[in-house]
Amino acid sequence: MPIQLLARFRVALGWVFAPLVLIVASPTAGSIAVGMSIAAIGEGLRVWAAGHLNKAREVTSSGPYRWFAHPLYVGSSIMGAGLGIASHSVIVIALIALYLWLTLSAAMASEEAYLRRTFGDQYDLYRQGLADRARGHANRAFSFERALANREHRAVIGLVLAVLVLLLKATLNGAL
């Protein structure tokens, strides 16, 4: 049960960590430029994945799902690394790493259990790299509308807000 709760409330927990991260962060123009470039790559991966995913309805094997079982979480991890670098603080990097390790481990365990219960052999074949042998697997083209339906715009907005806050903090600290 604790794993399911951690998985379910991972976004809310992020908002709990955010003020602490902001207090400790010491962003500079250079750290923001490098970190946000990395974070943008992570968000790009998330958008690409969300544009292929039909959550809870099928096993998706197209787009980044060909290479990653959990491309949304890989993208989140890359974003976290970028935000850590942008913050220019080893403490923030450690906090982000701890948060991501705890919440994404729980989310992946919970999600995989759900997918195995729901799709059984289809999901197991996908995980074995044999998705083309599974009945009903989804191999489709990217759809921006699907990415919006999967609410990926929320992550984009969150990333933009993080950049703005780090820019504000850097400005107030005289680093810009």
Image (spheres, helix red, strand yellow):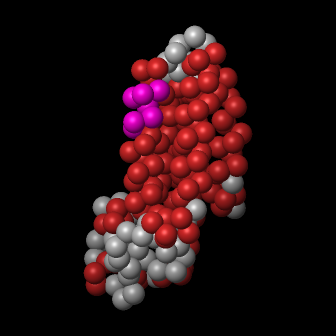
For the point 67% across and 23% down, the residue is 23
Please say whether residue 8 is one of the residues in the magenta stretch: no
Q: Is residue 74 visible?
A: no
For the point 67% across and 36% down, the residue is 17
Q: Is residue 8 left or right of residue 167?
A: right
| Majority secondary structure of magenta residues | helix
* Snapshot quadrant of residue 40: top left
56 relative to 18, above or below? below
For the point 45% across and 34% down, the residue is 36
* Snapshot quadrant of residue 151: bottom right
Please say whether residue 37 is one of the residues in the magenta stretch: yes
70 relative to 84, above or below? below
* Snapshot quadrant of residue 47: bottom left
Q: Is residue 114 visible?
A: yes
Quarter of the N terminus within the rendering:
bottom right
Q: Is residue 34 left or right of residue 100?
A: left
Residue 42: x percent and y percent? 42, 47
24 relative to 39, above or below? above
132 relative to 80, above or below? below
- First to last magenta residue range: 32-38
Residue 108: x percent and y percent? 51, 60
Residue 122: x percent and y percent? 40, 82
Residue in the foreground of this view, choosing between 113 and 148: 148
